[in-house]
Image (cartoon, rainbow, N blue to C red):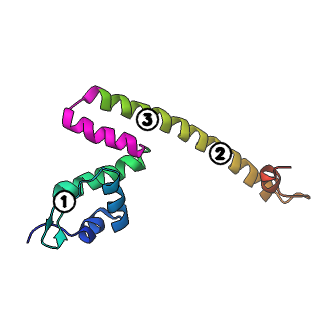
Amino acid sequence: MGGMTIGRLAEAANVGVETVRFYQRRGLLPVPRSAGAVRRYDEEDLRRLRFIRRAATAGFTLADIAELIRLDTTEDRPRAAAMAADRLAALDIKIAELEASRAALARLSAACGKGEEGPCPILEAFDPD
């Protein structure tokens, strides 16, 4: 009997079985017909699961991922490119925010490391009062 069990599929994609089931419930991953008592997954299912994970890591929402999957069947490249451009813009903003936070934390860390009297600037910076 060919194909992978859900456990093997999850392992090959480096996710948990519940993650596979979650994506199935959301309609992102098809539920295969069972061959006897066990459902079998193929390489296309593994490809789709890996795509979902990579897209989620890039910051696409589940709704966006569902749309990208639909676009794959329609070959609507302009829409897919627009979605990617939107994500890139959002990632650029997030990267800029993280770089600013990193720079601020580096300054605070250096100031705290000088060993001057009084509370550490890091503690003061994060104190809401």
| Left or right: 21, with 106 as reference point | left
In depth, the one of 44 and 25 nearer the eye is 25
The relative height of residue 129 versus residue 13 in the rendered view (above or below) is above
Would residue 40 be seen by someone viewing this image from the given angle? yes
| Left or right: 85, with 50 as reference point | right
- Label 1: how many Cα within 10 Å (few below 14, some 14–19, many 20+): few
Q: Main secondary structure of the magenta part?
A: helix
Residue 84 pos. (x, y %): 37, 34
Q: Pointer 1 and pointer 3: residues touching (CB < 8 Å)?
A: no
What's the residue type where badge 3 is placed? Answer: Leu
In depth, the one of 109 and 16 nearer the eye is 16
Q: How many marks?
A: 3
* Magenta-colored stretch includes residue 63: yes
The relative height of residue 33 versus residue 63 in the rendered view (above or below) is below
Residue 87 pos. (x, y %): 43, 36
Residue position marked by numbered label 3 in the rendering: 88
Camera-near label (1 vs 3) is 1
The relative height of residue 85 versus residue 56 in the rendered view (above or below) is above
Camera-near label (1 vs 2) is 1
What's the residue type where badge 1 is placed? Answer: Pro
What's the residue type where badge 2 is placed? Answer: Ser
Please tell me which residue is depicted at 83% across the width and 52% down the height of the picture: 124
Residue position marked by numbered label 2 in the rendering: 101
In depth, the one of 81 and 95 nearer the eye is 81
The relative height of residue 81 versus residue 57 in the rendered view (above or below) is above
Please tell me which residue is depicted at 36% across the width and 58% down the height of the picture: 22
Q: Quadrant of residue 30?
A: bottom left
Residue 24 pos. (x, y %): 30, 56
Query: Most extreme residue toward the top, as rendered?
Result: 78
Residue position marked by numbered label 1 in the rendering: 32
The kind of secondary structure element at disc 1 is loop
